């Protein structure tokens, strides 16, 4: 669904966390560009739908479990989990656009399952009770990087709980020392694994998204912004189309350097 750039009413089901309370208008503005590039993209990361299914099969929440998705985007993971069975879920995101899409999808596809949607900064959100499942896919910058994300999710999840983190990493075929010398430090799979293990997490599985996944994601943002530009003609939308072109150029530049993995872990206890 293409959202009109003019429609800015937060769905009444969305709770506003204190971290967003004084800036809702500004958030509509700030995240409009992200909306232009993602308004009809259900998976906003390089995973394929079968890789997402693999994650959902592993998460497999039991009745009564609490599932928290930080940087939940348009709610795809929570709504797809809800279609498989009951649990109570919370999706936190800083984009009002994304959360409006999440509530629409929730009502249309899994209305009977209890999912709360919260507009807020994931870094400042503390759940009332520790969730049995904590997810963060494609939003590791919320805690600066992979290491910060791993620490944050480990601290908030229940003992013996499940954590899924999807994040950028060094491309599997890249030479780490030459990337370090020429570009800067990018954590490799081994670095991410040792970070998780140093936090006491048990790694159950790691899923490496491939280059085709990245290409599909970038192509989806291109298709989305083209539709947005037609629906909302003008300079602002043309800026968004330029942003998307920059994303595509950066993707080409970093094709052999940056990859993406999903880590599926259990907390101790
Ligand atoms: C690349 S998308 C990933 C969305 C979703 N997890 C997925 O994989 O489809 C990143 C999401 O993080 C959200 N976001 C950005 N900064 C945030 C913050 N500080 N707190 C919560 N969400 C944030 C964006 O609005 C966006 O929905």
Image (cartoon, rainbow, N blue to C red):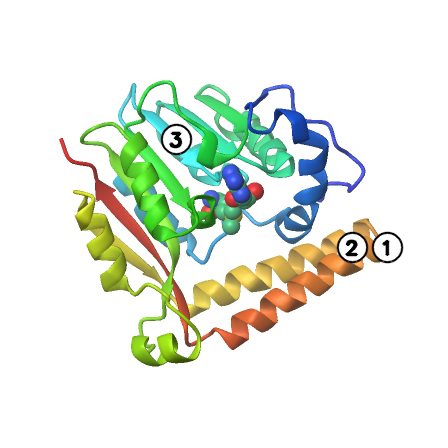
Residue on which disc 3 sits: 68
Circle 1 residues within 10 Å: few <14, some 14–19, many ≥20: few
**How much space separates mark 3 and mark 1, taking CA atoms?**
38 Å
Whether residue 227 sits left or right of residue 157 in the image: it is right
The C terminus: image quadrant: top left
The N terminus: image quadrant: top right
Whether residue 147 sits left or right of residue 39 in the image: it is left
Compared to residue 41, the image places residue 15 above or below, namely above
**How much space separates mark 1 and mark 2, taking CA atoms?**
6 Å
Residue at 52%, 60% in the rendered image: 217
Circle 2 residues within 10 Å: few <14, some 14–19, many ≥20: many
Q: Position of residue 61 (x, y in %)?
A: 29, 30
- State yes or no: discs 1 and 2 in contact (Cβ < 8 Å): yes
Compared to residue 16, the image places residue 73 above or below, namely below
Mark 3 vs ligand 1: CB below 8 Å: no
Residue on which disc 1 sits: 234
Q: Position of residue 172 (x, y in %)?
A: 31, 71
Sequence-wise first label, 3 or 1: 3
Residue on which disc 2 sits: 237
Q: How many marks?
A: 3
**How much space separates mark 3 and mark 2, taking CA atoms?**
33 Å
């Amino acid at each position: 669904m293409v959202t009109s750039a003019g429609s800015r009413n937060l769905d009444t089901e969305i709770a506003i966390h204190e971290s967003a309370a004084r800036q809702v208008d500004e958030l509509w503005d700030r995240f409009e560009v992200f909306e232009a590039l993602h308004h009809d993209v259900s998976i906003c990361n390089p995973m394929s739908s079968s890789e997402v299914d693999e994650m959902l099969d592993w998460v497999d929440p039991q009745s009564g479990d609490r599932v928290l998705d930080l940087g939940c985007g348009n709610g795809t993971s929570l709504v797809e989990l809800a279609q498989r069975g009951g649990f109570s879920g919370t999706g936190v995101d800083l984009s009002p656009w994304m959360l409006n899409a999440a509530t629409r999808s929730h009502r249309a596809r899994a209305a009977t399952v209890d999912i709360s949607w919260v507009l807020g900064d994931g870094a400042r959100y503390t759940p009332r009770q520790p969730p049995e499942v904590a997810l963060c896919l494609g939003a590791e910058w919320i805690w600066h990087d992979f290491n910060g994300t791993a620490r944050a999710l480990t601290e908030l999840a229940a003992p013996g709980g499940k954590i899924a983190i999807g994040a950028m990493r060094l491309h599997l075929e890249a030479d780490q020392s030459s990337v370090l010398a020429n570009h800067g430090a990018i954590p490799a799979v081994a670095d991410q694994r040792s970070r998780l293990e140093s936090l006491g997490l048990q790694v159950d599985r790691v899923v490496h998204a491939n280059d085709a996944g990245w290409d599909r994601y970038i192509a989806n943002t291109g298709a989305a912004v083209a539709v947005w530009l037609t629906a909302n003609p003008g300079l602002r939308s043309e800026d968004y189309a330029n942003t998307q072109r920059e994303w595509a150029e950066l993707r080409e530049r970093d094709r052999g350097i940056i990859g993406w993995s999903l880590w599926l872990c259990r907390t101790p206890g």
